[in-house]
Image (tube, rainbow, N blue to C red):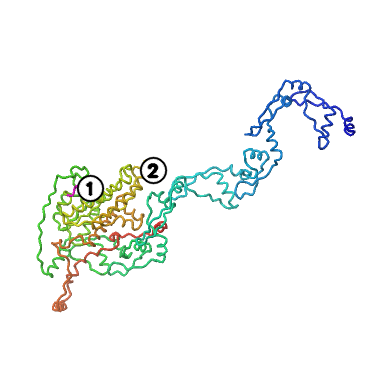
């Protein structure tokens, strides 16, 4: 030793210390030399007594072997040695958790650090201990990319939150999505103090999957004179899908929208003779008519429409013979406007008055044919058409046999129309034509419709339900029944094309059969259908949705096939389907009693449109009205008669003043005027759809 250490050594004395073994009362000696070494290694010169064993424990240690123990760090495969001395000192307890040499060497240079809170815009920080850093390193990550953790304040708020179910953001969807507690925390921490947090709106899983799978589709502009296209976006497709619509509405391209931006609502004169009122020609009506290449419509002003809506046909009594006769609302409007006078005589008495003035014409008589309806034919092998049409009663057969003008309406349940025969459109058509031509009793419309019958079955029952009557006009429609879908499995693309080809061929064959009669043909396309509104068979929502989409698509294909066939054959066509949808889907559904059947108001519109087509296309020959000559203008009196009339006192009204005015000329707009209904302003969604 050096002198200094020796001097210190002489001052030290051996110390008796307690045994470090847990529960042992023995002593061991810490000699002066060991104390001197401890003093020289201590930084402050004050050595810490080591852990030692008493002689008894050292003797017991000889029988104990060192053990290899795993590293305390989870996932580490390193080990450390638990010596015999430490085992004796533990007093039989479990070995302490320790690091292996590798982990310990990694841990020594590390220091505790602070990392920012993981919540966006939070200014707090999180303590990242060196042991957490060691775990980060051992997992194969770099200290340059610390983990994302919450501060104590954010974590406290997070533990008070729970996941919430939110409604889908898509209007009309009943699905939900989960707003997690973490997402709620982010919104809360990013909301300025004093303001209410605004939670996000999202799609449910089904809507999101549809949106991600869908693709934008280019659609033609609704303007028939435009070749541009507009984009049916994924969002628009999703909205249509949620509401059960499988096809887009018609819409203008961007160029046409810009071209129509300068249009404004304009006033137009009332179409009623003698009226000085006006009606508003709305922008959306102008756009629709320009796009469809239609002429500007003629309409009555709101005052005239209100008059027609608030008045009903009255029954007047003839002042001459006392017979009751009808005074229509249109004739009442003419009187109200001052263009006519209230009639005092019935049509028979007016005829007699005219006969006194107009030279008697030789009446032509026609031999009434005897109607023979065959009992045997191909209809007997088809249960659906085996029986006669339910509205072809004997009284109606007798009526059409006594008529000069015979019209037969043949079709399916949409031609049967309403359950009440008087409210069905064929009955309304007969009444309107009789009133128009003043020919009650010589014009008959026979309803030969059979439920669930198609165009092929019409061919099979032609010899029974059409030919015997030798009609002047045949009004037919089978598009609804031919488009029905009853089995989804058979509706593949090939089956559709086959059926459409059969329908086109059947229409041609039907027209060829009709050439054996003097009849002219008129085909009417039925009202639109809304399969998604069907309330039957919804036990399987997915299957129902598929059926509804397929039904709507195939119905439109049948309508298109029928249009093409009629145009090719030169058959007059009344497109009731398009006329129903002219004011939009919301208005069209007001005229529907069910998802496929029109209501009473719809029946009136159909009768009105078919009547206009008959008159416009001259499908009825006026020469056939033999018993009642056509009204002729009053001949101008000769000069002598004028002088004589001037001398006679004006006590009695002139005969012509009691003659009822002729029926109003047919209106040109597609909506039936006898049933005026205010046109609803389109909603923002409808305006967007129309643009």
Give the image quarter of residue 97: top right
Tag nearer the camera, 1 or 2: 1
- Give whichever of 426, 517 is nearer the camera: 517
Callout 1 secondary element:
helix
Tell whether 606 sits left or right of 240: left
Q: Position of residue 183 (x, y in %)?
A: 55, 46
Callout 2 secondary element:
helix
Q: Is residue 275 above or below residue 62?
A: below
Disc 1: which residue? 456
Q: Residues within 10 Å of mark 2 (few under 14, many from 20)?
A: few
Residue 340 is a magenta residue: no
Q: Quadrant of the C terminus?
A: bottom left
- At a point 39% along the width and 60% down the height, the residue shown is 228
> Label 1, label 2: how many angstroms apart (C-alpha)?
33 Å
Q: Quadrant of the N terminus?
A: top right
Q: Position of residue 37 (x, y in %)?
A: 83, 32
Tell whether 524 sits left or right of 189: left
**Callout 1–callout 2 Cβ contact below 8 Å:** no
Label ID, residue 328: none
Q: Residues within 10 Å of mark 1 (few under 14, many from 20)?
A: some
Q: Is residue 644 above or below residue 469?
A: below
Give the image quarter of residue 364: bottom left
- Give whichever of 379, 196 is nearer the camera: 379
Q: Earlier in the sequence, mark 1 or mark 2?
A: 1
Label ID, residue 542: 2
Q: Please provide the residue range marked out in magenta.
A: 450-462
């Amino acid at each position: 030793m050096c002198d200094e250490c020796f001097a210190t050594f002489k001052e030290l004395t051996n110390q008796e210390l307690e045994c470090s073994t847990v529960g042992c009362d023995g002593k061991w000696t810490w000699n002066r030399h060991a104390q001197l070494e401890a003093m020289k290694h201590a930084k402050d010169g004050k050595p810490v007594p080591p852990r030692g064993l008493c002689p008894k424990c050292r003797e017991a240690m000889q029988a104990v072997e060192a053990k290899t123990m795993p590293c305390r760090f989870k996932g580490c495969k390193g080990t450390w040695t638990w010596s015999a001395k430490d085992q004796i000192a533990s007093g039989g307890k479990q070995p302490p958790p320790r690091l292996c040499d590798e982990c310990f060497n990694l841990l020594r240079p590390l220091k505790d650090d602070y990392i920012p809170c993981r919540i966006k815009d939070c200014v707090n920080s999180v303590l990242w201990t060196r042991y957490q850093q060691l775990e980060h390193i051992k997992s194969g990550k770099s200290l340059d990319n610390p983990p994302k953790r919450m501060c104590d304040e954010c974590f406290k708020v997070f533990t008070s939150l729970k996941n919430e179910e939110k409604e889908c953001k898509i209007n009309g969807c009943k699905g939900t999505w989960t707003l997690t507690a973490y997402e709620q925390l982010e919104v809360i921490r990013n909301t300025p103090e004093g303001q209410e947090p605004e939670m996000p709106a999202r799609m449910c899983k089904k809507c999101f999957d549809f949106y991600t799978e869908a693709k934008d589709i280019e659609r033609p502009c609704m303007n028939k004179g435009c070749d541009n296209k507009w984009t049916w976006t994924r969002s628009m497709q999703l909205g249509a899908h949620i509401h059960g619509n499988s096809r887009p509405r018609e819409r203008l391209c961007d160029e046409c929208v810009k071209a129509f931006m300068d249009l404004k609502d304009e006033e137009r004169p009332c179409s009623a003779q003698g009226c000085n009122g006006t009606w508003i020609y709305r922008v959306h009506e102008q756009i629709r008519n320009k796009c469809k290449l239609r002429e500007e419509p003629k309409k009555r002003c709101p005052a005239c429409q209100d008059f027609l809506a608030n008045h009903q046909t009255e029954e007047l009594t003839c002042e001459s013979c006392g017979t009751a006769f009808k005074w229509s609302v249109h004739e009442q409007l003419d009187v109200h406007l001052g263009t006519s006078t209230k009639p005092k005589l019935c049509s028979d008495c007016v005829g007699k008055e005219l006969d006194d003035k107009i030279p008697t014409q030789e009446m032509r008589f026609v031999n009434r044919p005897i109607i023979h309806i065959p009992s045997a034919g191909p209809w007997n092998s088809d249960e659906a058409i085996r029986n006669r049409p339910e509205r072809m009663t004997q009284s109606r057969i007798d009526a059409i046999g006594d008529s000069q003008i015979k019209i037969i309406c043949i079709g399916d349940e949409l031609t049967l129309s309403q359950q009440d025969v008087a409210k069905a459109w064929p009955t309304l058509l007969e009444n309107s034509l009789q009133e128009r031509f003043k020919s009650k009793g010589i014009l008959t419309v026979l309803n030969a419709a059979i439920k669930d019958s198609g165009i092929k079955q019409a061919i099979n029952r032609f010899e029974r339900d059409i030919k015997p009557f030798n009609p002047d006009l045949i009004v037919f429609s089978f598009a609804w029944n031919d488009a029905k879908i009853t089995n989804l499995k058979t509706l593949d693309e090939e089956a559709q094309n086959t059926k459409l080809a059969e329908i086109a061929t059947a229409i041609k064959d039907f027209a060829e059969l009709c050439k054996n009669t003097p009849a002219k043909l008129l085909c009417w396309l039925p009202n639109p259908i809304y399969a998604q509104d069907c309330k039957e068979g919804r036990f399987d929502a997915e299957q129902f949705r598929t059926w509804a989409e397929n039904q709507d698509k195939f119905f439109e294909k049948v309508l298109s096939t029928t249009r093409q066939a009629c145009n090719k054959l030169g058959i007059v066509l009344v497109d009731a389907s398009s006329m129903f949808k002219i004011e939009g889907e919301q208005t069209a559904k007001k005229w529907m009693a069910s998802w496929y059947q029109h209501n009473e108001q719809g029946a009136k519109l159909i009768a009105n449109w078919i009547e206009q087509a008959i008159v416009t296309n001259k499908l009825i020959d006026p020469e056939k009205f033999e018993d009642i000559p056509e009204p002729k203008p009053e001949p101008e009196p000769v000069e002598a008669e004028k002088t004589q009339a001037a001398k006679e006192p004006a006590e009695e009204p002139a005969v012509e003043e009691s003659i009822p005015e002729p029926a109003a000329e047919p209106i040109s707009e597609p909506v039936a005027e006898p049933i005026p209904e205010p046109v609803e302003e389109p909603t923002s969604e409808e305006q967007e759809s129309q643009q």
